[in-house]
């Protein structure tokens, strides 16, 4: 995209008037800390960072940007793994962290109104006294924002049972690139009243509008939960156990997979020591009835035994359960300590293709000479293949990038998707055509319809 | 919309060449039987009916229609309640009933590929031997098609636990109004790869493209199920019990409500005799574990007792359970026998507004002097208020239409929606502006983007 404007001193003056001088910064420190997310891409500095507090302020910023054709990037917690908030063309970064109010919890409705800058874990802490929670639990739950989750259709460990962010957004207020403030959706659990604009916006990675508040559907916290950890001496055993659990009609709240490399890294770099086998599964069961949960755990245990499990852990206390989930949550920090610049894969395939795709990861690792580990929410088909390299732009990094690209192509070729939950951002734009074929053209036209000047998140997604 | 063409004799010739003469009809009987759905609106005859069997044939029909600007209406089982397939401007009706193959069941993937003309109950009969089912169970399950369900984002009795059609469509093939055949979506349970075109098409009521096949996510059939019927001497008691069940964190597969009028009509017009009280609830529990289901039934029974229930039925055999569900399924036939032209309401409100909205129905019935009954899937907020009139275009029908319109406005005013599952069609177009405000303009632009000549389902929805 060519011909973007740069904020002039009078533009900056106008922004300061609208937002207050403390919420507009051209300070180099602020530009730097608002330039990257968790994707290890190139550095692009914005010209200015703003921290609006209301939809009206966001509208004013977008009006100015649209008048002057200045690029605008929207940023939440900065935990994205695909660079979807990286200001590729400079311009204005809208940082949503000051729009961080939980506006209203309506326990009887099982709903909450939130601003986009609310942190996921903080929202759930706020909801817990009401016996409620917002399920999609991404790995970055301690610092990711609800706005970012909506923009990215985020999910995580509990998606296999509870679904993804898309399934929980009832309505939202957005500011269009021309500064119009619109409400879309209705605060009900289902509807058939025309085109689903809410779900068009969920996962649109900030390219269609800026979300300034949202109403989310909530769930009651489960009365009982129970965790099972299982270790296998072969990848085949672990993966076939996952399929067997699903075929049995069990409905676990989590079905996690970690291979030997990941288990070893966690044992080495975290406070949790795990037994070393070829792979590990962690299952969690939720339910209203204690006996119901116990019976599901028993059935799962029988299935695991039938799939050649070599060791099963059934924690008998909340502490022991927490230890297992701490191990799982130590996955990324451990990978980060083992590799200066890991490439974090995120693909999803149909369940019948799980084993082939996991094995394909190892085959590609061998072929390209890259250390590779497989983990992920395998219960719904979501595989995170992590490629450990010795630094960005090194030879091993280049080889890992090629291997990862080949794996993404493979996932698409078996009916899967280039990203399950991390998004396209700037990382995976090259796969959009393979993924969508001619229907990519419809997406481009929808983008133009919402954003005729192309000012919102240019260079990202589309 | 002005300026539509009419099929000429050479157009009909072209259609016969493409589809074969047996799949093109201008016979008056065929025109009549393809003119209406279950909405009691005015009669509009199409000029020609076609029964394509492939996406390529659909594409040829649309190319012709687009060249000549002839309106095209798409029709499945004709069970729609809002007139979404009524050929308001004449032209071509595409009847999908010859595209009725279950293409492939993939049990390990929990997926099925289907053509749009497959009947819902037939699909589930086909899936049952695999231990699988497609949950959204609409009332018209015996004759509605999967294509119609997708076009309408249909749901029904099991939505409170399992969600709606939208939640089960993974990918689909559509033919655009200009005749292009596109595949959208991916055959996986979640993704973050750009704009969600699948969910833009679900619920678009045939206005954006013609769906020629779809891949659906399936669920394993529950191992155990149990039904509870409960009778109350006040509406308040029944509705408060529903909210109490949800607040307890129970997760029934159905939470149905029938008021006295409906219970009496069912007893009178069906083979099932029900005890007469102010209202009746039917709950169904599904689960993997028998004991888990039993414990949920026990908890629900305790809650019902705390809400002033006067009679509880706990069926002890599959036959007894079936009897209760037969009663529920007899609802619409019974209403149809009691009234020559009932107006079937379909609104949805937040759960905290359930009681107010039910009571509002009675208040409006009294104010407008119309016999009114309330039923519905109240567990998710979906209320079907039925207005019994003595015939279409009679005075009582006019009054009922006004009362129903006022109730729809009320639902929207409390954060709800004009339709939960029946759709907008031609029936509720007047509410689109109240429902969506300025964002209706975005829908209009999306329609133009997909269908620049406005040939698909003109007069419907938008």
Image (cartoon, coloured by chain):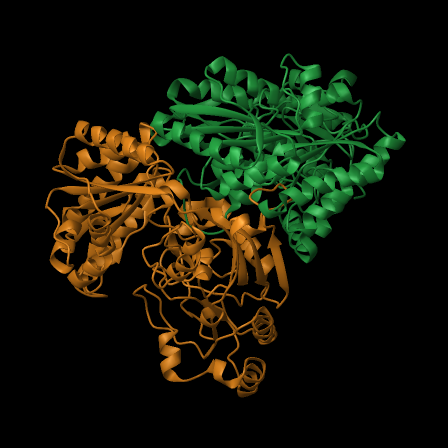
Chain colours: A orange, B green
Q: Is B442 displayed left or right of A92 in the figure?
A: right
Q: Is B350 displayed left or right of A43 in the figure?
A: right
Tell me if residue B33 can be seen: yes
Q: Relative to residue A111, is residue A90 depicted above or below?
A: below
Q: Nearer the viewer, residue B187 or A154?
A: A154
Q: Nearer the viewer, residue A459 or A356?
A: A356
The residue lying furthest to the right in this view is B395
Rendered residue at 58%/64% (across/down): A175
The quarter holding residue B441 reads bottom right
Q: Nearer the viewer, residue A27 or B88?
A: A27
Name the spot of residue A220 as percent of width and height, x first: 44, 46
Name the spot of residue B4 as percent of width and height, x first: 78, 39
Name the spot of residue B171 as percent of width and height, x first: 47, 38
Tell me if residue B26 can be seen: no
**Numbered-mark total:** 0
Rendered residue at 36%/61% (across/down): A80
Q: Relative to residue A436, is residue A149 depicted above or below?
A: below
The quarter holding residue B386 reads top right
Name the spot of residue B327 as percent of width and height, x first: 61, 19
Q: Nearer the viewer, residue A461 or A76?
A: A76
Q: Relative to residue A295, is residue A191 depicted above or below?
A: below
Q: Is A129 displayed left or right of A238 in the figure?
A: right
The quarter holding residue A426 reads bottom left
């Amino acid at each position: 995209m060519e011909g973007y404007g740069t904020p002039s001193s009078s533009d900056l003056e106008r922004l300061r008037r609208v937002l207050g001088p403390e919420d507009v910064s051209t300070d180099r420190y602020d530009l730097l800390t608002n330039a990257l997310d968790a994707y290890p891409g190139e550095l692009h500095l914005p010209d200015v960072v703003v921290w609006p507090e209301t939809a009206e302020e966001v509208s004013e910023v977008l009006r100015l940007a649209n008048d002057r054709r200045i690029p605008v990037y929207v940023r939440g917690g900065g935990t994205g793994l695909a660079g979807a908030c990286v200001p590729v063309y400079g311009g204005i970064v809208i940082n949503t962290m000051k729009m961080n109010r939980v506006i209203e919890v309506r326990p009887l409705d099982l709903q909450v109104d939130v601003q986009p800058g609310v942190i996921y874990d903080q929202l759930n802490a706020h909801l817990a006294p009401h016996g409620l929670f917002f399920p999609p639990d991404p790995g970055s739950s301690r610092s990711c924002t609800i706005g970012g989750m909506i923009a990215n259709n985020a999910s995580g460990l509990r998606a296999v049972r509870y679904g993804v962010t898309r399934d929980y957004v009832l309505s939202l207020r957005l500011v269009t690139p021309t500064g119009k403030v619109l409400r879309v959706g209705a605060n009900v659990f289902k509807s058939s009243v025309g085109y689903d604009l809410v779900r068009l916006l969920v996962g649109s990675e900030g390219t269609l509008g800026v979300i300034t508040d949202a109403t989310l559907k909530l769930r009651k916290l489960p009365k009982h939960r129970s965790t099972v950890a299982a270790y296998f001496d072969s990848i085949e055993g672990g993966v076939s156990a996952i399929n067997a659990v699903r075929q049995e009609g069990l409905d676990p709240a989590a079905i996690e997979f970690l291979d030997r490399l990941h288990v070893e890294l966690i044992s080495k770099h975290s406070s949790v020591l795990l037994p070393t086998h070829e792979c590990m599964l962690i299952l969690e069961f939720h339910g209203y009835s204690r006996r119901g949960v116990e019976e599901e755990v028993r059935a799962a245990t029988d299935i695991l035994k039938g799939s050649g499990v070599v060791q099963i852990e059934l924690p008998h206390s909340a502490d022991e359960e927490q230890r297992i989930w701490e191990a799982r949550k130590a996955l990324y920090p451990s990978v980060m300590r083992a590799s200066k610049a890991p490439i974090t894969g995120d693909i999803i395939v149909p369940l019948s293709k799980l084993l082939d795709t996991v094995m394909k990861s190892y085959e590609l690792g061998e072929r390209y000479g890259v250390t590779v580990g497989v983990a992920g929410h395998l219960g719904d088909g979501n595989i995170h293949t992590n490629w450990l390299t010795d630094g960005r732009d090194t030879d091993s990094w280049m080889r890992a990038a090629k291997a990862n690209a080949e794996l993404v192509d493979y996932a698409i070729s078996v009916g899967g998707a280039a990203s399950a939950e991390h998004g396209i951002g700037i990382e995976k734009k090259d796969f959009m055509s393979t993924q969508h074929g001619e229907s990519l053209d419809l997406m481009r036209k929808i983008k133009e319809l919402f954003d005729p000047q192309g000012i919102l998140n240019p260079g990202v997604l589309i």
